[in-house]
Image (cartoon, rainbow, N blue to C red):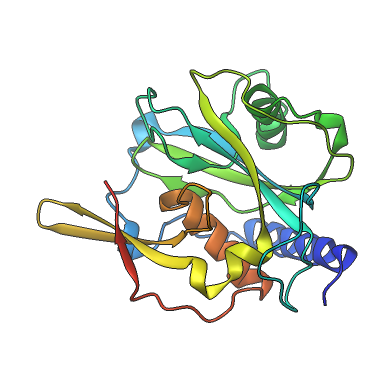
Amino acid sequence: MTRLPAARAALESLAARHAELAAAGQADPRLPSSWRFARPDPAGLRHAAVLILFGRLDDQPAHNPHEVVPEDLDVLFVQRADTLRQHAGQVAFPGGKVDPGDDGAIGAALREAEEETGLDPAGVDVIGELNETELPVSNFLVTPVLGWWARPSAVGVVDPGESAHVFRVPVADLLDARHRVSAVVVRGENRYASPAFSVDDTPLIWGFTAIVLSRLFDELGWTLPWDATRELRVN
């Protein structure tokens, strides 16, 4: 079975490849055509960052271990409050808008993660940035920041007006084919589909977050075969 140091090395290698693509001007920020509601409005485009934080699970190992990733590797999520104007109730990575005082995308991702989950940023080893991805619904250009939770700290909901739930999910369970479906949204005559992850008692992970996560697993070579024709309607 793959061990934690090997998983971290794979993430470091991926971040380096993304840096090379960005330097060569070859990064593509677009979402898959199946989830492309519209292109962002350049006039009001804002920048945001999210923290994709991997670490060693401190509760219990994966229910469905396999050889691709360590059974004790997990990733951190937040479920947004139902009262928010945008993406209410959806699962996301910790993150938000890049403010003028932030040290770029990395500074914004760490600050937002601390504000949303209470984690200690000093315990996070920043691995690197992935290429920016468009989020047209809220007109953001989002930079995913890969992090490794070298010294985990307690996390939980800090502001109930922002987050309803903070939780960690074993990566092996996310990769299990039984937990993978396609989330489908219907808007009038248009139909949109994204990858989704439905793991036991955790909230459904779909939309932008699931697209970023699914792409990440694909690029790492961690994805296991799954049936994309299994569909789940979401609002």
Q: Is residue 19 left or right of residue 84?
A: right
The reply, left or right, for residue 189 in relation to residue 33 is: left
Residue 131, image x, y percentages: 60, 53
Which quadrant holds residue 97? Answer: top right
The answer to whether residue 131 is above or below residue 121 is below
Q: Is residue 145 above or below residue 163?
A: below
- Image side of residue 122 versus residue 119, left or right: right
- Find the residue positioned furthest to the bottom: 225
Is residue 82 or residue 54 the one in the foreground?
82
Q: How many marks?
A: 0
Residue positioned 48% across, 32% down in the render: 80
Q: Quadrant of residue 20?
A: bottom right
Vertical order, 87 against 189 (above or below) = above
The relative height of residue 102 versus residue 182 in the rendered view (above or below) is: above
Instruction: Indicate the position of residue 143 as horizontal and vertical percent values.
Output: 59, 44
> Horizontal and vertical percent for residue 92?
52, 42
Which of the 4 image quarters holds residue 213?
Answer: bottom right
The residue positioned 45% from the left and 27% from the top of the image is 81
- Quarter holding the N terminus? bottom right
- Can residue 26 be seen here? The reply is no
Please indicate whether residue 189 sits to the left or right of residue 36 in the image: left
Q: Residue at x 75, y 79 (%)?
A: 67
Instruction: Judge by depth and name the residue closer to the eye, 63 or 23.
Output: 63
